[in-house]
Image (cartoon, rainbow, N blue to C red):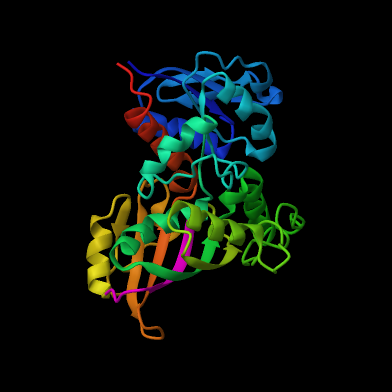
């Protein structure tokens, strides 16, 4: 016996990935509904070998549905998530709306699965920011061994993190470099993204950090350990899919790079590709479509007493969003909403 599942935002990049991953992982679905705004009503999307028609989220009756995966942004989530939750449908939300609510668990299943028990306070579970999700998957097994004091991370985030409009802008600007008359001015991003990098993701905060950087700090503390200090610089790069991160870690105890490599090889959700030779590492192009968070370039940092550096790459549409949401649904089903 399976679950009645809703995917809200099923026409977007993340929503479509949610449908793909539900099918790939053979999540026990008895019935599925796909929702979006009224203008997308009747649009067809694929779920395995089935073709589903989009329903209007405004008119949807949430009664009797078990789990809803939301990928509709904070504004729409604010309207529809409470309705779904009140009807008894557990919402797994990909927006930032509920991530910092103390009554809503923020979950990465490989890192803090025990937090799932807190879902009952509001019938809502939050999915973390894409850049946070892959980082904490890499950090958690190392933290368990040597206790992390401080993390300095620089991200190299793909344009798909900004949605379809971001991907289109990179494509159009790239074409415009070679075709006279097709030049494209920045619209989605603050500056030209083609053949460039932009050290701003989201709006600026009073302290000079951006909201994306602030998210990484706050979410890492909530998911892992509030005592960990995090300094983040988040950069948008001209890559379509796949976020990369350069991570510097300072531990309380010494951790040898070889032991760290062995720990990560055994860690859930992690794949270590780390050869000290040209090409002996993973780049974002190679992680697209994969479930794993890839770790490379593991090495001692001699500038601090107990330091390591590593390179972390993951498909942001998968582990950074859709996959993590489906994994939360699996965790919820296995531990809480058991059927059959």
Q: In the image, is 95 to the left or to the right of 303?
A: right
Task: Determine the residue located farthest toward the bottom in the rendered image.
Answer: 303
* Residue at 38%, 69% in the rendered image: 310
* Residue at 38%, 28% in the rendered image: 23
The magenta segment is: 243-255
Q: Is residue 32 magenta?
A: no
Assign the magenta stretch its main secondary structure: strand
* Residue at 67%, 34% in the rendered image: 78
Residue 313: quarter of image: bottom left
x then y, percent, for residue 71: 57, 36
Q: Quadrant of the N terminus?
A: top left
* Residue at 42%, 50% in the rendered image: 288
x then y, percent, for residue 98: 59, 41
Q: In the image, is 167 to the left or to the right of 48?
A: right
Q: In the image, is 82 to the left or to the right of 125?
A: right
Q: Is residue 201 positioned above or below 67 on the image?
A: below
Q: Nearer the viewer, residue 294 or 139?
A: 139
x then y, percent, for residue 80: 64, 27
């Amino acid at each position: 016996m399976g679950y009645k599942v809703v995917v809200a935002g099923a026409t977007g990049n993340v929503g479509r990935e949610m449908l793909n991953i539900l099918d790939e992982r053979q999540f026990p679905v008895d019935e599925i509904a796909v929702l979006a705004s009224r203008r997308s009503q009747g649009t067809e999307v694929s779920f395995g070998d089935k073709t589903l028609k989009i329903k209007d989220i405004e008119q949807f009756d949430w009664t009797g549905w078990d789990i809803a995966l939301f990928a509709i942004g904070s504004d729409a989530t604010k309207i529809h998530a409470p309705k779904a939750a009140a009807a008894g449908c557990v919402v797994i939300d990909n927006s930032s709306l509920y991530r910092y609510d103390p009554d809503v668990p923020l979950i990465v299943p490989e890192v803090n699965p025990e937090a799932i028990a807190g879902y009952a306070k509001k019938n809502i579970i939050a999915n973390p920011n894409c850049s946070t999700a892959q980082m904490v998957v890499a950090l958690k097994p190392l933290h368990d061994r040597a206790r992390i004091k401080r993390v300095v991370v620089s991200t190299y985030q793909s344009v798909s993190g900004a949605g379809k409009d971001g991907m289109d802008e990179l494509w159009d600007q790239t074409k415009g470099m070679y075709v006279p008359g097709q030049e494209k001015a920045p619209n989605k991003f603050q500056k030209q993204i083609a053949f460039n990098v932009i050290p701003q993701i989201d709006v600026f905060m009073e302290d000079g950090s951006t909201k994306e950087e602030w998210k990484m700090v706050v979410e890492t503390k909530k998911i892992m350990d509030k005592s960990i200090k995090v300094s983040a610089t988040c950069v948008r790069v001209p890559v379509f899919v796949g976020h990369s991160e350069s991570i510097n870690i300072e531990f309380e105890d010494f951790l040898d790079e070889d032991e760290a490599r062995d720990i990560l090889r055994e860690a859930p959700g992690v794949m270590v590709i780390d050869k000290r030779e040209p090409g002996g590492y993973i780049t974002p192009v190679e992680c697209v479509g994969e479930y794993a968070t890839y770790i490379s370039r593991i090495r001692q940092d001699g500038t601090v007493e107990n330091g390591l550096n590593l390179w972390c790459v993951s498909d942001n549409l998968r582990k950074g969003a859709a996959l993590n949401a489906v994994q939360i649904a699996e965790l919820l089903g296995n531990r809480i909403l058991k059927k059959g």
